[in-house]
């Protein structure tokens, strides 16, 4: 039996204050080893997210389309 772990990058288009979130002692950082395993080559998170260095898989395209449809747009 194999174990598959999927971490999902989340984002928000909301404006204003987010309450009830504590970042004390936490950090956000890229997992370059995981990126290499997923994409088969060493890619920086910035290149993946902002420069389109890796193709988006079909199943993720559907999820992204649904998130874009359901997310409120900022004016």
Image (cartoon, rainbow, N blue to C red):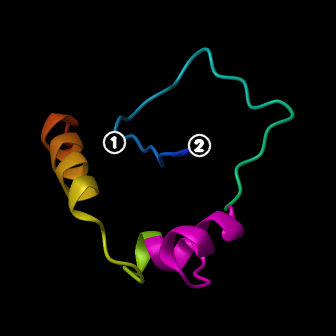
In the figure, is residue 36 to the left or right of 10?
right
Real-space Cα distance between discs 2 and 1?
32 Å
Residue closest to the eye, 52 or 61: 61
The residue wearing badge 2 is 3
Observer-nearest of 70 and 66: 66
Give the residue furthest to the left: 69
Residue at x-position 59% and y-position 70%: 37
Q: Measuring 72% from the left and 24% from the top, which residue is drawn there?
A: 22
For the stretch drawn in magenta, the main secondary structure is: helix
Q: In which quarter of the image is residue 69?
A: top left
- Mark 1 neighbour class, 10 Å CA radius: few under 14, some 14 to 19, many 20 or more: few
**Screen quadrant of the N terminus:** top right
| Chain-order first, disc 2 or disc 1 | 2
From this viewpoint, is residue 74 visible? no
Residue 59 occupies which quadrant of the picture?
A: bottom left
SS for tag 1?
Answer: loop
Residue 18 drawn above or below residue 9: above
Left-right relation of 62 to 48: left
Question: Who's the residue at 39% across and 40% down the image?
Answer: 12
Q: What stretch is highlighted in magenta?
A: 31-48
Q: Residue 55 shows which numbered tag?
A: none
**Coordinates of residue 8 in the picture (x, y in percent):** 47, 46
Q: Is mark 2 on a helix, strand or loop?
A: loop
* Picture quadrant of residue 5: top right
Q: Relative to residue 8, is residue 70 drawn left or right?
A: left
Residue 14 higher or lower than 2, as above or below: above
Q: Position of residue 17 (x, y in %)?
A: 50, 26
């Amino acid at each position: 039996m194999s174990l598959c772990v999927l971490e999902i990058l989340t984002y928000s288009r909301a404006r204003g204050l987010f309450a009830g979130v504590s970042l004390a002692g936490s950090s956000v950082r890229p997992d370059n080893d995981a990126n290499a395993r997923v994409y088969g080559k060493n890619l920086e998170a910035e290149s993946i997210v902002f420069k389109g260095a890796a193709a988006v898989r079909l199943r993720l395209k559907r999820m992204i389309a649904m998130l874009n449809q359901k997310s409120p747009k900022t004016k």
